[in-house]
Each structure stands twice: as structure tokens, then as C-alpha cells.
Amino acid sequence: MRHPILIGACLCAAHLLAPSCTSTASTPTAVTMSYSAEPLAAGEHELEVHGMSCPKCVSNVDLQLKRLPGVDAAVVDMKRGVVTITLSGNARPSARDLATAVSDAGFTLRAIDRGAQGGTP
Amino acid sequence: MIRAALFATAALALPTHAAAQETPNMPAATSPSPGVWIPRMQARAYLLENDQTLLEQDLRIEHGLARDLSMWAELPLYEGFLDAPRPSDGEFGLGALEAGIELRVLQHDLDAIDTVRGAVFAGAALPTATDGFGRQSLDPFVGAAITAIFGRHGVNAAARYTFVTGDTDLPLFIGDDGEDVIGADLGYAFRLAPAAYGEERVAAWYLTLELNGAFTAEGDREVLFAPGLLVEAPTYAVELGVQLPIAQEGSDRPEIDLGIFAGLRLLY
């Protein structure tokens, strides 16, 4: 009887955790949705990314961003937490696409072109 | 010994992934991106009491199912140089295949580097162990892990409860006598170099310290202290370390005198 009781207790705990998990996990999604779906202009853009704590993180962000059509290059400056990307072609990603890619890599996009006029968000 | 050397060489030859300041002998709240497959391998040698040796090679694969959800499967391979009737003459065997899912329930990226992650996981150890290398039972488990990184300091904590449903006449690991096992791990990683990241991509060197504990309700316990070195670059990582017993008590399993682990991880 001990195991079914413990398993039941764990399932209940998981069930109780689920709403808060969803709530916590939805935060990056909410942030992602706050970005524009309009394609960004060709040229260089600076992404302020939080949570890149190791060299491997750089590879993760690289991988996800370079999968996007229109992203020619991604250069990560870990010291500043800035990823500089170069966009070209007609099928360029939107700010929302970039936020999703960064989130999929396991990190948080805080701003795009913060130093430039009209930077988001 | 030649087979043992080949065993270790094979372990070093296959690619694995590296994760942020992830200490090598415990779960961490890190997971692959959606759609990404990550093969992983670790090799270790346990020097046991009475000049016995157990070599272990863990094959692990992780897969990202969704942004916060991943799955994994892990199969240990063993080679035993133990006292009879346990595998005594360099016999190879399988351990219990573990399969599980992990859900990230917490992610706070505080600034460029600092982050706090939390995850819960659940799964089961399947009865794939061959004779002499563990119990042949289906044992569910649940657990949680937290990873926090603040500048050069990384902390990992994990707990796991395994519902043991079977036993074996020749216990080799804690829990083999049929008692449920509580695992508790604490890890610390200090980035030795670079002191601060720059614009260039360089390898990071970490000193890792771990306490790996396992306990049963009957009083069995095993607590190991594991200092090590982790070198992590964008495309590879190397880890080396030892496991030193702090406390061991219970059942008839052979006690650990020293554990040695080494690994090479390649990133794609």
C-alpha cells in the first residue's frame, strides 16, 4: 500500500504544481508576444539577452537564431549579454520571431536595439 | 585490463553535451531546446573494498519536446571485477534503463549571466539489468532540481525519490535490498577562468564540488564528496574528478573506496 499512496501523493502534488508551472512558464511567452510581428529592417540589430551564463549558451543562441530565415550572422558578446545579428533578404524575421528563438534556446530576450531610437520593447 | 582500457576509451570517444555550470554527478535544471537531440556519455571507475573494481559507462540521450519539456533515457553499461559470485572476471552487463520527462517550472534570467532555473522530473527504471548488475524491477521515481548561477558561482541542488519494487540476492547498489531510495545532491561550481567574460569566445574552467547522497528508510546510506574540474568551451567540454566516501552504511553491497570519473563532451 505504501507505493500507491506515495505515487498518489506525488500525482496530486504535480497536479497542484501545474497551474503555477504554467503561470511561470507562460512568462517568457507573454514577453515574446509583446514584440512586433513585423519583419525587422535589413542590417545589424542588437539583442539584449539575459541568462547566457556559459560558453555553451552562446552555441545555443547561435543555433536557434541562425535557423531563422534572413539571419546571416550572430555574434555574441557574453560580457554585455548582447547578440548582434545581421539580417538580409526578403524573408527577414520579426522581433517576435527573434524573441521566440531566444526563448527556445533557453534564455530571455529583454530588448532589441535598446540603444537605437525606436528600440523595443 | 585491456578491455577496461577499451571500455574507458570508448566512453571518451562518443559525444555528449555540456550545460551551464552543471556539476557532473547529479541532475540539473537544464534541458535541451525543442527538437534538439543530445547524446551524452560518462565513464567512471569505482574502486571497491577488497580490491574489487566496477567500471561504469552511462549512455544518455535527451530530447527537447517543447520549450519547457524534455525527455531522456539513460542506460548504464558495467564491467565487473568483483568477488564471486558477483561478476568477477571482467564480465560486461547492463544496468537498469532509466527513462523520464523533465518539466522546467522556474526560469528567472536576472541579467546577462545570472539565472535561476527549477525543474521537476519523473520516470522509471526499467528491468533491463543483467544478472549481477542490479535489481530487475520496474522502479518509478520523481524528483526536482534547482540551478542558480550568479556570476562566477553556480549552485545545483536536487532531490529524487525512487519507489523500489524489487530486490536482488547480491546487492551492488543502494536500494538493491528492496528499500525505497531518497537521493539528495548538492553541487557548487566556481568559474576559475575567465574571471569575467569578454567579447571573445573562450573556454571556461570550473572547479566543481559535490555532495551526492543516497538514503533508505532502513538506514542504508551512502554519501560521496566529489571534487572535480570542468572545462567548457562552445563546442566541447572535459570533466575530471573523483568521488570520496564520507559515509557508507547498510546492506551487503561492497563499499566504495574511491570513484574516478572522466568525460569528453562534444557540442554540435
Image (cartoon, coloured by chain):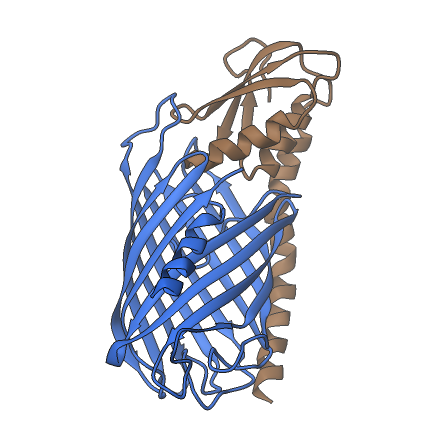
Chain colours: A brown, B blue
Residue lying at 49% horizontally and 46% vertically, measured from the top left: B15
Residue lying at 55% horizontally and 59% vertically, measured from the top left: B120
Position of residue B220 measured from the top left corner of the image (x, y, whole percent): 36, 83
Which residue is nearer to you in this view: B266 or A17?
B266
Figure check: A46 above or below A24: above
Q: Dividing the picture into quarters, in which one does residue A35 lie? A: top right
Q: Dividing the picture into quarters, in which one does residue B61 lie? A: bottom right
Regarding residue A15, the answer to whether it shows in the image is yes
Regarding residue B152, the answer to whether it shows in the image is no
Position of residue B44 measured from the top left corner of the image (x, y, whole percent): 37, 62
| Residue A109 relative to residue B232: left or right | right
Which residue is nearer to you in this view: B229 or B91?
B91
Figure check: B217 above or below A18: below
Position of residue B267 measured from the top left corner of the image (x, y, whole percent): 50, 39
Which residue is nearer to you in this view: B35 or B183?
B35
Q: Dividing the picture into quarters, in which one does residue B103 lie? A: bottom right
Q: Quadrant of the N terminus of chain A?
A: bottom right
Hey, which residue is sitting farthest front in the picture? B2
Q: Quadrant of the C terminus of chain A?
A: top right
Residue lying at 53% horizontally and 81% vertically, measured from the top left: B164
Position of residue B130 measured from the top left corner of the image (x, y, whole percent): 53, 78
